Image (cartoon, rainbow, N blue to C red):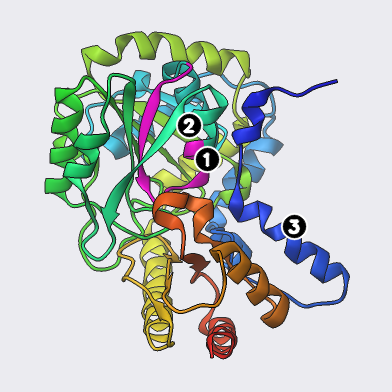
Amino acid sequence: MKISKRVAGVEYAIRDIALVAKKLEKEGQKITYLNIGDPVQYGFQPPENVKEAFVNAIKKGQNYYAASEGLSELRNAIAQKEKAKGLSVSEDDIIITNGVSEGLEMLMASIVEVGDEVLIPGPYYPPYASYVRLFGGVPVEFLVDLNNSTPDFDDIKSKITSKTVAICLISPNNPTGAVFNEKSLRDLVNIALEHDLYIICDEIYDQIVFDEKFVGIGKVSSDSPIILVNGFSKVHLMSGWRIGYIAFNNSKQLEILRENIPKLARVRIASNLPVQYAALESLRGPQNYISEFVSQLKKRRDYVIKRLNGINGLHCSIPKGAFYAFPKIESTKYSSDKEFVIDLLKSKSILTVHGSGFGTQYGSGHFRMVFLPEINVLEPALDKIEEFMA
């Protein structure tokens, strides 16, 4: 009996590390979980009108297979949202997926052959590298200046080879909170155009920004081969319902992809139909809850960054978006960040994620924690981290 070599490269540090915590819990240890970026697990909930739309769809009998591409009304509403951000899309350019992860899997399955290379921002969200590897490709990290939220363009250019097929962007970024500005996005698009590369841009945190107005890649897209992925887990607080989408920019270079990815959508049948009605309501209904959500996150971010930067041996750049802090471990006796994270867990019952799980080249020597909990949870957790560093 055997398994394929492809699965050996699949990792998901955020949940893998939780297995250690679950073992300690069974032994009676009470764990403070600061590892998973799920707002709903920390007390946030989708608005009542969105919950009602989900329940009403079920009660009305909307329990059958949806169209493989997704509910027409939802695709239209998504197209309007992305057009408002600048992307040139229509309903026909949208495919509904079971979360962004499925959309990402479909994209990598469609563009990556064995030996192909995909550029991803370092540090990166783990599924990007895992899906590239799953289809025989090679993920290549490029450097991002975390203090200025700026990609290193010289580094990107030096890493483009004849095997490179795409550049991936995640803005706002997980795990660092970096948010690319308009100039950076335009320069990245120009590099991709020069080398005939796909641009895959993940904007799932698009409305969770704190200091400056968010600029989507659509604003600089023109007719470039840009594929956007987005979803409803973060901004719309629908993480457990698993719904996302792929949006294709109006580009002739994407025609072959636009024709073939729907085949993968048909093979997996469809996305959850009642949830699609809830997602539609989340776009059409009141949006005021988002600003309240972001306002609370900003207070928690400010508190966490101030505390982290007051701890000897840690330094943390200021995240401009999303809900993660990614401090650098400047002073430690540990041989690896994973060893650091596990000892912090065992000795202080605080679960974070080792930075090398987000890429060894630029993630090593860091750890990631969420600032989603209320301050009365974050305060004792940071007290324990401070004690641990001392």
Mark 1 belongs to which amino acid? Answer: Pro
Q: Disc 2 versus disc 3: distance between alpha carbons?
A: 25 Å
Residue 18 vertical position relative to residue 131 in the rendered view, above or below = below
Image position, residue 323 (x, y; %): 44, 64
Is the residue under label 1 in contact with that under label 2 (CB below 8 Å)? yes
Mark number for residue 19?
3
Which secondary structure lies at badge 2?
Answer: helix
Is residue 118 a member of the stretch shown in magenta?
A: yes
Q: Taking the image as drawn, is residue 113 in sight?
A: yes
Which secondary structure lies at badge 3?
Answer: helix
**Residue 163 vs residue 216, the one in the foreground:** 163
Mark number for residue 313?
none
Mark 3 belongs to which amino acid? Answer: Leu
What's drawn in magenta, residue-wise?
A: 114-129
Is residue 151 a member of the stretch shown in magenta?
A: no
Q: Taking the image as drawn, is residue 32 in sight?
A: no
Tag 2 residue: 104
Q: Is residue 113 left or right of residue 197?
A: right
Image quarter of the C terminus: bottom right
Q: Disc 2 versus disc 1: distance between alpha carbons?
A: 8 Å
Tag 1 residue: 127
